[in-house]
Amino acid sequence: MIIGPESGYRTGDENLGLFEEGPEPIGYLLKRVQHSLRLAMDEKLREYELSTPQYAALWALGREPGLSGAELARRCFVRPQTMSEILAKLEGRKLVERKPHPVHRRVVEVRLTEAAVGLLGACEPDVRMIDERMLSGLNAQGRRELCRGLLSCAEGLETLLTENGTRPPPS
């Protein structure tokens, strides 16, 4: 391994390319935002005896009732095994119901209970407050541009992964 100016690693007081002052890498900034958002959500949702992944599952089911566990795992960016654990806890609290699909008997649909709908309604103002705080430094145009930019970044990476055969095309 080469250590010195040609490698980009700092060995002393020299000013090297990888460590020059300047904007933080976008991946680092995205992870920093995600981490801070997760901490804020966990703290607030604790009042409702929910974790952020549990809230995400309930929220997704509120938008798309009847998802399978595998579909829900994809929507919530977790492994199917993790979603199975999340659903077991939510089912134990009588916040979701799982029933066989009417046509595809091997597929189990997940739906919110009335208790979950009420809980989501109670959480919503707090979740919106966290979103508002996160976006407070942006005006309406800045918020639209951020959303467009993040969507473009996600699509660019998804295209790269699909081209590399790392993941199948979105369905």
Image (cartoon, rainbow, N blue to C red):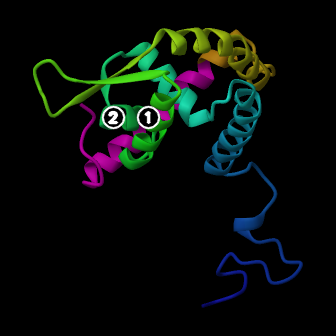
Distance from Cα at disc 1 to Cα at disc 2: 8 Å
Tell me the residue at 82%/57% (across/down). 21
Q: Residue furthest right?
A: 13
Do labels 1 and 2 touch, CB within 8 Å?
Answer: yes
The picture quadrant where one finds residue 101 is top left
Residue 2 vertical placement versus 171 (above, below):
below
Residue range of the region highlighted in magenta in the rendering:
145-171
Q: Where in the figure is residue 106, as x and y percent of width and height?
A: 15, 34
Total number of numbered discs in the rendering: 2
Instruction: Choose mark 1 or mark 2, whichever is in front.
Output: 1
Q: Residue furthest left?
A: 103
156 in magenta: yes
Q: Find residue 95 and report its horizontal and vertical position in percent.
A: 49, 21
Amino acid type of the residue that numbered disc 1 sits on in the rendered structure: Leu
Q: Residues within 10 Å of mark 2 (few under 14, many from 20)?
A: many
- Residue 67's spot in the image, x, y percent? 31, 24
Horizontally, residue 69 falls left or right of residue 8, namely left
Residue at the spot 64% in from the left edge and 80% down from the top edge: 7
Residue at 69% x, 24% y is 48
Residue 106 against residue 97 in the figure, above or below: below
Q: Which residue is mark 2?
A: 69
Q: Nearer the viewer, residue 60 or 117?
A: 117
The picture places residue 38, in percent across and down from the top left corner, at: 68, 38
Check the image and report above or below for 131 versus 33: above
Front residue (pair 168, 129)? 129
Q: Residue under label 1, please give it.
A: 87
Label placed on residue 114: none
Quarter of the figure with the N terminus: bottom right
